[in-house]
Amino acid sequence: MMTTTIPPRRKVGTGTAIGYGITDIFGGGSMALIGTWLLFFYTTFCGLSMLEASSIFAIARIIDAILSPIMGYITDKFGSTRLGKRFGRRRFFLLISAPLMFIYALVWVSDMSYWYYLGTYLAVELLVAMVLVPWETLAAEMTNDFGERTRMAAIRLTFSQVGTFLTASVPGVMIQYFGQDSALTFTYTGILFSCLFFIVVLITWSCTWESKDMNPEEFERLNAGPSIGLISHLKNMFIELATTFKIKIFRQHLIIYISSFTALDIFIAVFVYFVVYGLSLDAANASAYLSIATSVSIPATLLFMFMLDKLNIRPALAMRISYLCIFAVLGYLILMYIGHSAVSSWWLTTLIFVLLGFGRAGLYFIPWNIYSFIPDVDEMVTCQRREGVFAGVMTLMRKSTVAVAIMIVGAVLEHSHFVKGQLIQPESALNAITGLLVFGSGGLLLISLYMTFKFKLTRETHRVLVKEIDRLKAGGNKADCTPETKVVVKALTGYDYEQVWQQDNNARP
């Protein structure tokens, strides 16, 4: 039996975690700026009609849904190439993407053609996939320690919130200098953020490492094999994407992840309508409430890190705490609607939206923290490290459900006879808005809540799994596995112990 030397572990300190996580300023900030301002920029300064501008987003969404899993597969296999062996299968893409960040500034140039704007936006979508998909895999490659990965995920999502904050505040400063009627406001904003994104991606490249740096022998084993043609690569890619769903804990994780994130998507999409038309308040109130939640999310993310890392609270339990906060917010809003009353208690409303920010932080942080442990479970089944494929599938599922959620909200409002621009809406529209909050957001959260009671990935079960993988890599006999370990392997993978770690098959589940 082949054995693998287990190298000394390289510690991920706070400085390294910051260097890793800072790239989420790009991850959170680039799309937040586009989502907030680009449609307005296209239709106001670029001479595009609403249909033309919307078509750019629609085309990009279709292409991007394909790009993410392809990028994940490429980075998993890139280690067998000459460039991959020299620069790494993940960090190579960070290195070449850093100078390409200035493509982002080209999006914000006015008075160009439709094809220019379509091309530059598609280039940005490709750039985002080139950075985020390999970058998201690095936490799993750099360490298998539960606490270190938890810290990395928390710091990463904190920087994502910082990026979102910057995209909300910097354009306002630019407007003060150049005016809201000048395209230069957005051009200079794009240049400024391009420079920032260039810096943060280079910092991450310089502060991180991957498996080839820690264990060259294992890296060579994982990337060994004969060269194959394009058709075979495409066939293998689709097979590998499909086999991710055979890992039990990943299926459960996807249900938790997609249900909770889509619940928040629906909540955010409907919330302004609910405040303006259901509660008869102005849009400024909705903005103020969401600002409270956003400001709370940054420290709340660090608090959830403390709960998981230092207090050893199980991820499933931490998710339930988040759900309780969101349910409290939904309940309060429905009581306000039923009573047809304006906000009667400023401090109570503030407290409710503090709870929203706290719950939102947990729903965003915990699933991405859990993700970094999924490739370890997969390795027990396949004897491979497929972080890229899992990152690609998660990104694909997430972006698809965002589009579906927005379509559902639009279709329901249209069907309920919602009248755009009319202050007084028909009863059917008000009931639809309320129903989306209760049965849309609330229903999806209940699905996610149910799945947390079946979710068995904890610090303890992960430690048992990694210990067994290390034992088998060192040449251990499968017959010597303890009954307790077999139970853990079954609970996480969905396979009996006898079915996993089939090295002779270079296993696919």
Image: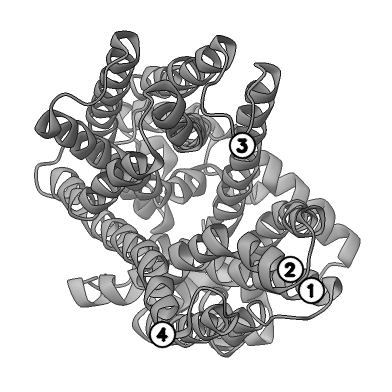
Q: Which residue is mark 2?
A: 122
Mark 1 vs 4, N-terminal side: 1
Can residue 260 be seen from the camera position used here? no
Q: Which residue is mark 1?
A: 119
Q: Which amino acid is tagged 2? A: Leu
Query: Dot 1, how many residues are within 10 Å of its Cα: few (below 14), some (14-19), or many (20+)?
Result: some
Q: Secondary structure at mark 4?
A: helix
Task: Answer with left or right where residue 80 lies relative to residue 499.
Answer: right
- In this view of the protein, which residue sits in the foreground, 15 or 322? 322
Q: Which residue is mark 4?
A: 177
Q: Quadrant of residue 462?
A: top left
Q: Position of residue 96 (x, y in %)?
A: 59, 86
Q: Secondary structure at mark 3?
A: helix
- In this view of the protein, which residue sits in the foreground, 391 or 480? 391
Do callouts 4 and 3 mark residues in contact (Cβ within 8 Å)? no
* x 66%, y 58%: residue: 68
Q: Which amino acid is tagged 3? A: Ile
Determine the CA span between mark 3 and mark 2.
Answer: 21 Å
Residue 302 against residue 95 in the figure, above or below: above
Query: In the image, which is nearer the foreground, mark 3 or mark 2?
Result: 3
Q: Secondary structure at mark 2?
A: helix
Q: Which amino acid is tagged 1? A: Gly
Q: Which residue is mark 3?
A: 406
Mark 3 vs 2, N-terminal side: 2
Mark 1 vs 3, N-terminal side: 1
